[in-house]
Structures are given as C-alpha cells and as structure tokens.
Image: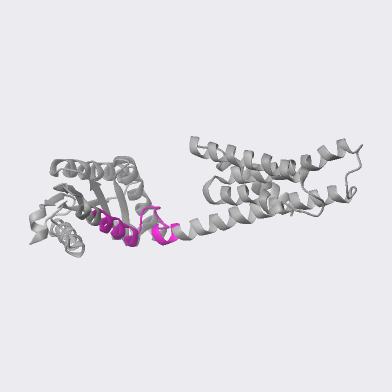
C-alpha cells in the first residue's frame, strides 16, 4: 500500500509540478493558513482539536491546484502540526501535556491529511475524466459531435448578446475522408483507426490554436475557424488537404478528403440549418470528383 502511494505521488509530481503565478500564490496562501493554524494549535487548550482547519488548504488545493500542490500542502500540514506540539514540549522540558501519545496522534493526523489529499486528487481526476469522456472522441482526442455543436451554439448565442454584433463570425468546414473505406476493408480496422488518428494529427498541426476541430463520427470531421474570411477558410482547408495527402502517401495510402465550407455571420441563428448547409456542401464535393474544397456563402445558409 505504501509503495503504491509512493509511486502514485512520484507520478503526480512528474506530471503536475509546474505552477502558474496564480497557483503559486494559492500555494503560498495555503502555507500561511497552515502556519497560522499551527500557531493557534500551540496555544489552544488541551482537548481542543484544530484538525479541520489543517484540512482547509488541502481541500482548496484539491479543487483548484495541480496534484503536486495538494501533496505539498498535505505534508506541510503534518509538519506544521508536529511543530505546534514540539514547541510547547521545549517549553515544558520535553514533557508535553498528554505525553508521547500526543505524538502518535500527530502521526495519525498526518496520515489522515495524506489520505484526504490522495482521495481528493483521485476524485478530481475521475470527474475530469468523465467530463472528458462526455466531450472528447476517445479514438482521436478531438472534440465529439456533442461538444462541437455546444461550441457552435455558444458562438451564436454570444453573437446575439453583443451590442454591435460582428458581421462575420467565422467558417464552418465539414470534412469527409476519401479512400477511407478501401483502407479499412483492405488493411483492417486497426489501419482504419490509424487513418482517423492521422487526420486528427493533421488538423492539430495545420490549424491555428484558436481553431476547433471535431470528429463527428465514422470518417467525418468538422472544423470551426473563428473570425475567418472566405479566403482564410479556403486557404486553411487547402493546407489541411495537402498535409493529409502528403502524410497518407508516406504510408502508401490513397486517402484524401472532400471539404465543404459554410461562412457563418451574425445573421445566422439556425444552427441545424448551418450544419445541414455544411454537410450538403461537402457532399456536393463528393458528387463532383472528391478531393476538393468548396465554399458556400452565408446567404446560402439563410436560404
């Protein structure tokens, strides 16, 4: 058990020890809280326990800080409580009230802090994992359909709430892989999954940080390019298409994509209509030779 806790602690430290300035400030405040609590504990009358006060910064850290910070504060809480006992011991010639059973009590309290830290971190990781499962495509790591449509809904809602809404909100692109079924049938499902992951990798590498991409299901993907003009959207999708072809050729796959783009502006309020327009534009490319990019203007969406 202890070995498991130690290995878990070390893995947490490796993954979550880089603090932002705000997080470092919260850690410092937690340390100050523990110091003040230890001071109060050293002067508290016999029988009065302040264990709950030691747990406060640990609980806050478990909610807002990396796992490494939670462990630091848990160990610090035990150290501070130990010092709150040792200091009175020195004043009483090494014989604290309650004898050395009090030191055993401190050890048990420290174990309690570590247990709280461990289970609080695990609970947060579980909640984050469940949240990620609800919004992320597990094969590619991209957003799933639900999360993507929620994103577009938020974009349209935000455009309505602005006093002077921006005319152009961005571009929505639908992408369907060409040649995917042939690879999947010839080389098996593992190869098909690799094609999907390759597409996701291309989207991450080619698109901007502010762009959002999703796997809608099967071999269909979608991209939201905020603030893009028509030329920007076409240029971005052509880069995706070129990169996909190049990467696929390296693996001897004849894989490309048919891409349909719809420009979205502040007059567009019907999200299902926008999605249908992007899907229809993509299928127009499918019917007319595949492996191309086609754009439909916002007025087509309104129609």
Residue 285: give x, y in percent of width and height.
14, 55
Q: Nearer the viewer, residue 266 or 234?
A: 266
Residue 263 is left or right of residue 189, and the answer is left
* Residue 203 visible to the viewer: yes
Q: Is 92 within the magenta?
A: no
Looking at the rendered image, the quarter that the C terminus falls into is bottom left
Q: Residue 109, relative to residue 43: is it above or below?
A: below
**Count of numbered tags:** 0
**Which scheme is used to colour this image of the protein?**
one colour
Residue 156 is left or right of residue 125, and the answer is left
Q: Which residues are magenta?
A: 132-155
Q: Residue 15, relative to residue 280: is it above or below?
A: above
Residue 70: give x, y in percent of width and height.
61, 46
Q: Nearer the viewer, residue 32 or 24?
A: 32
Residue 96 is left or right of residue 248, and the answer is right
Residue 186 in which image quadrant: bottom left
Identified at 11% across, 56% down, the residue is 288
Identified at 67% across, 41% down, the residue is 36
Residue 215: give x, y in percent of width and height.
32, 57
Q: Nearer the viewer, residue 100 or 242?
A: 100
Residue 78 in which image quadrant: top right
Residue 200: give x, y in percent of width and height.
34, 49
Q: Is 144 within the magenta?
A: yes
Secondary structure, magenta segment, majority class: helix
Residue 132 is left or right of residue 205, and the answer is right
Residue 137 in which image quadrant: bottom left
Looking at the rendered image, the quarter that the N terminus falls into is bottom right
Identified at 21% across, 45% down, the residue is 237
* Residue 182 visible to the viewer: no
């Amino acid at each position: 058990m202890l070995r498991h806790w130690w290995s878990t602690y070390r893995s947490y430290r490796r993954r979550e020890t880089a603090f932002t300035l705000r997080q470092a400030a919260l850690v410092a405040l937690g340390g100050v809280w523990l110091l003040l609590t230890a001071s109060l504990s050293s002067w508290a009358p016999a029988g009065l326990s302040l264990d709950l006060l030691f747990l406060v910064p640990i609980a806050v850290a478990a909610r807002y800080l990396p796992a490494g910070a939670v462990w630091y504060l848990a160990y610090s809480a035990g150290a501070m409580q130990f010092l709150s006992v040792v200091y009175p011991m020195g004043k009483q010639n090494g014989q604290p009230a309650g004898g050395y059973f009090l030191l055993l009590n401190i050890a048990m309290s420290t174990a309690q802090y570590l247990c709280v830290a461990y289970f609080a971190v695990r609970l947060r990781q579980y909640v984050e994992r469940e949240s990620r499962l609800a919004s992320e495509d597990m094969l590619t790591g991209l957003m799933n359909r639900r999360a993507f449509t929620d994103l577009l809904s938020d974009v349209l809602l935000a455009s309505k709430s602005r006093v002077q809404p921006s005319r152009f909100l961005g571009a929505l692109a639908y992408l369907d892989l060409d040649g995917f079924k042939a690879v999947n049938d010839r080389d098996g499902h593992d190869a098909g999954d690799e094609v999907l992951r390759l597409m996701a990798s291309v989207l991450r590498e080619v698109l901007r940080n502010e762009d959002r991409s999703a796997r809608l299901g099967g071999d269909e993907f979608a991209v939201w390019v905020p603030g893009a003009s028509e030329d920007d959207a076409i240029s971005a999708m052509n880069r995706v298409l070129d990169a996909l072809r190049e990467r696929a050729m390296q693996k001897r796959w004849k894989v490309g994509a048919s891409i349909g783009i719809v420009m979205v502006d502040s007059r567009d309020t019907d999200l299902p209509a926008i999605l249908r327009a992007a899907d229809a534009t993509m299928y127009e490319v499918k019917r007319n030779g595949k492996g191309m990019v086609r754009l439909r203007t916002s007025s087509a969406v309104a129609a």
